[in-house]
Image (cartoon, helix red, strand yellow):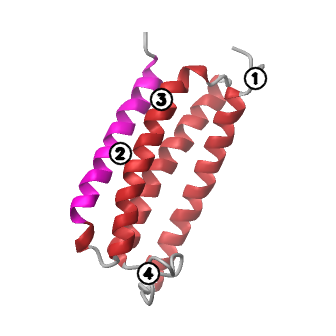
Amino acid sequence: MMSESRRCLLWHGMFLFLLGLLTGLVEAHFSNIRMGLAAHLEGVMNGTFLLALGAVWGEVRLTARLKGATYCAILYGTYANWAFTTLAAVFGTGALSPVAAPGLQAVRWQEDLVQIGFTSVGLAIIAGTVLVLWGLRRGAAP
């Protein structure tokens, strides 16, 4: 029998994959087309990541509290990565992505929002990934 959290990870993986595909359909209409492409790829790649994680979720050995925190961090990180990349594409921000946004600069609050968002995404994804690795280590208590 499939655990509910594993099934949810698989569902969210497919949903985020779909969001990525739909973003790809409109990427040419964003203020920053390159970030639109990045948002499309973030949705597709993060959706695939959630599917892969869902496939091994039953093997992750953590306390209930740590496993819950890991689940939340990973879901936040994957969805927020797509969302903040999409916002960067809509706003036309460029401060954090000079290669993807040469010469673009949004208003200050938009640049700040995207920067704070990407920082939180990085922290969440790194923390979640470290916890998954810890839970998959050899000798982790079942």
Image spot of residue 121 (x, y percent): 55, 56
Give the farthest residue toward the bottom: 103
Front residue of 51/2: it is 51
Which residue appears at 50% of the width and 79% of the height? 99
Q: Name which residue type carries label 3.
A: Gly
Question: How far apart in space, not on screen, are marks 2 and 3 (Cα)?
Answer: 13 Å
Mark sitting on residue 101: 4
Was residue 20 drawn as part of the magenta stretch in this picture? yes
Packing grade of label 1 (10 A; few <14, some 14-19, many >=20) is: few
Which residue appears at 53% of the width and 39% of the height? 72
- Dominant SS in magenta: helix
Mark sitting on residue 54: 3
Q: Name which residue type carries label 1.
A: Arg
Task: Say which residue label 1 marks.
Answer: 138
Which one is closest to the eye, mark 1 or mark 3? 1
Callout 1 touching callout 4 (CB < 8 Å): no
Question: How far apart in space, not on screen, are marks 1 and 2 (Cα)?
Answer: 31 Å
State which tag comes first along the sequence, 1 or 4: 4
